[in-house]
Amino acid sequence: MEKISKYDLLTTGAISRVIPQLALPAIIGMVVTSIYNIVDSYYVGLINTQATAAVGVVFPVMAILQAVGFFFGQGSGTYISRQLGAKQDQKAQTMASTALLTALLTGVAITVFGLLFLEPLSKGLGSTPTILPYTKDYLGVILLGAPVMTCSMVLNNQLRFEGNARESMYGMVLGALLNVGLVPLFTFTFGLGILGTAIGTVLSQVAALLVMWYYARRGESVKVSLRGARFEREYMLQIVAGGSPSLSRQGLASVSTLMLNVAAGAYGDAAIAGMSLVTRIVFIIFAVLIGFGHGFQPLCGFCYGAGLYDRVKQGFWFCVKFACVFSVVACVPAFLMSDSLIDLLRHDAAVVAVGGVALRWQLVTTPLGAFVMYSNMMMQTSGSTLSANLLAMMRNGICFIPTLLIMNYLMGLSGVEMSQAIADVLAFLVAIPLTVQFFRSLRKPA
């Protein structure tokens, strides 16, 4: 039986089959990755509350590294998928190489800058005097791994947008499995504490990068090579256009987390730890929703490049329906067991008191967050830069930051706990007219 090409699969295959087929590897990779983040939290929680809080304090830096990786990965990936849809394979290949080399150089710059200003950076992220030693140990190693993390994120995105979600998954899963073994080894067996947690995390990322590099070098249509990079105007502008929504989204997520840590820090280390654990638990649910969206993006890019606009719309609504069903199935049990989930990761009554309430608030608005996310993915992949950027800044920035400041002022800690849920509602209200406008802008090719 003749093997169907990626182009034919994405432009003619049944949407109800193609998106889940591409989404399943992405979901597995995302869920496994989020689970190993939870495993990290579990092992760090065995050290003490200050170590747990330190991981939460460093999260904005992790978000920045992700922002850089997604900027170059999604910026190049959206372009790659549209060019493959238009059957311009050479342009897609040059873009892949250019984005990877640029991400590598950016990661090196982050490492140098971060290590030069390690202590002031740690304090600026919200570390209290009791948390600071743990933050410096953890952050120092994470910064050393910055080039690895940014490049790994780029290859992960590029493989997905080419329709090679399974190959991307292999790297993510291997990294996650190694992390589960390496973190307790370095943390407890070697007695390195939170420093060992960071070492295990970075080494697992190195393994993931090597696997994805192997598959990127032997791709069907796109073969990545650093020597194939071309710093030409067309490619750099396309990276900015396609990647800026990711940079806006991830960058503001970093700023928001920083502000959340500072706001929670006013109520003690337990409040920081509790909000940090909520972020990681919610991410497990969102990992499935994000993974499903990752299955939609290659179809969206190929079909938009081929002028199949009705198929783009159908794919979007298919994802929204899935998100509604999944959110109910996943969020109701998590809502009922919220205190137990927090307690499992950190057996501290003060941490549970904060985390349990905040978790319930965030679970209620998960379907709204999913709609915003899928709309953002569709606009970004289709090249609607302005709308995609505006929507990307909503949930973690334009809506969240003012809400956090106002609710913290009016209601104290309770206001901090419910801020993300309120921001989700506001972002959803903005996403509706933007999505309607985008659909109206689509026209069938002449």
Image (cartoon, rainbow, N blue to C red):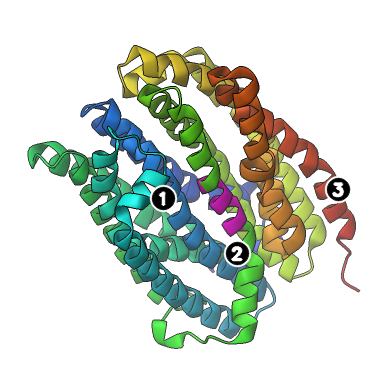
Tell me which numbered mark, 3 or 2, is placed earlier along the sequence: 2
Of the pair 191 and 93, the residue shown nearer to us? 191
Mark 3 or mark 2, whichever is nearer to me: 2
Using the numbered discs, state the Cα–Cα distance from disc 3 to disc 2 in whole angstroms.
23 Å
- Residue position for label 1: 62
Q: Is residue 49 left or right of residue 216?
A: left
Does the magenta run of residues contain 250?
yes
Q: Which mark is residue 243?
A: 2
Mark 1 vs mark 2: give the one in front: 1
Q: Please report the residue visible at 8 percent of the width from the left and 42 percent of the height from the top.
A: 190
Assign a secondary structure to mark 1.
helix
Left or right? Give the position of 320 relative to 207. right
**SS state under label 2:** helix
Q: How many discs appear?
A: 3
- Residue 111 picture location, percent across and down: 33, 64
Say if 344 sits above or below 170 in the image. Answer: above
**Element on which disc 3 rests:** helix
> Which residue is tagged 3?
436
Q: Main secondary structure of the magenta part?
A: helix
CB atoms of marks 3 and 2 within 8 Å: no
Residue 384: % across, % down: 75, 62
- Badge 1 vs badge 2, beta-carbon distance below 8 Å: no
Q: Amino acid at mark 1?
A: Met
Specify the label residue 173 is tagged with. none
Q: Between disc 1 and disc 2, whose residue precedes?
A: 1
Q: Tell me how far mark 1 sits from mark 2, CA to CA.
A: 18 Å
Choose mark 3 or mark 1, whichever is in front.
1
Image quadrant where one finds the C terminus: bottom right
Q: Look at the image and say whether residue 366 sits in the magenta stretch.
A: no
Nearer to the camera, 253 or 201: 253
Front residue (pair 6, 97): 97
| Residues drawn in magenta | 246-254
